[in-house]
Image (tube, grey):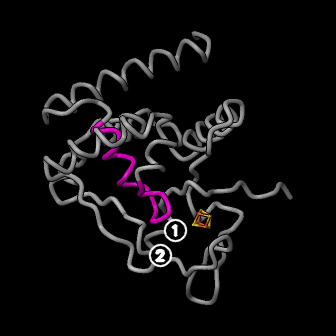
Amino acid sequence: MPPASALFERLAALVHQSVRDDAARHGLLPIHLQVLGYLAQANRYSDSPIAVAEYFGITRGTVSQTLAVLERKGLVARKPDERHGKRIHLALTAAGRSVLARSWARRLDDALAATGHDAQAAQQGLHALLAALQRQNEHRAFGVCRECAHFLVEGDGYRCGLTGEALAAVQTTKICREWTAPQAA
Ligand code: SF4
């Protein structure tokens, strides 16, 4: 079997090609499609231009240009935060969601399932590897809310221990820029 580094290189090249092809089908650049994919997963603390810049490691200028294209094409809309005046949230429109509906990510999930291996175990292994590489590169982890050290279950509901705010169930399966790894037992 080839070394892991060669396998990841090939996988990365195939994913890049798929992203390019999908984006071109919609008259978009790869970064446009990637930002749509990110916003579909981001929770309410992470659906801002600065979080997009942090997630992709790109400048705020590039983010502004990318969002301008997505808004002009009617794929993303800005919504003011109900509680914090200056804060805005970026949300996919119905057209934005439909761009993602048949994307490379779906095909990758299907291909993974078709290998016959335990998809969840593979996902856990990839997640651990990603976390290790992010630590090496001092990147924010952007983990899933339910797996965060600050995540609290209170009766029938959920709360963020960092902000003190209640969390809707739909937010708890999304990714967050403030995510913190739980301490090892
Ligand atoms: S519990 Fe953690 S991941 Fe969830 S909203 Fe709070 S900081 Fe973000």
Residue 166, quarter of the rendered image: bottom right
- Badge 1 amino acid: Thr
User: x%, y% of residue 80?
Assistant: 33, 70
Q: Secondary structure at mark 1?
A: helix
Residue located beneath label 2 in the image:
169
For the view shown, which residue lies furthest in the right direction?
Answer: 185
Q: Is residue 120 left or right of residue 106?
A: right
Q: Residue furthest bottom?
A: 155
Camera-side residue of 102 and 37:
37
Q: Quadrant of the C terminus?
A: bottom right
State the residue position of label 1.
Answer: 172
- Assess whether residue 86 is covered by the magenta stretch: no
For the residues labelled 2 and 1, say whether their Cβ atoms are less than 8 Å apart.
Answer: yes
**In-front residue for pair 119/3:** 3
Quadrant assignment, res 105: top left
Please state which amino acid type lies under the numbered disc 2: Ala
- Label 2, residues with CA under 10 Å away: few <14, some 14-19, many ≥20: few
Q: Residue at the location (34% across, 46% down)?
A: 37
| Callout 1: CB less than 8 Å from ligand 1 | yes
Q: At which x and y percent is residue 57?
A: 50, 34
User: In this picture, which residue range is highlighted in magenta?
Assistant: 32-48
Q: Residue 32's x, y, as percent?
A: 28, 38
Q: Which of the two residues, 24 or 71, is positioned nearer the viewer here?
A: 71
Assess whether residue 33 is covered by the magenta stretch: yes
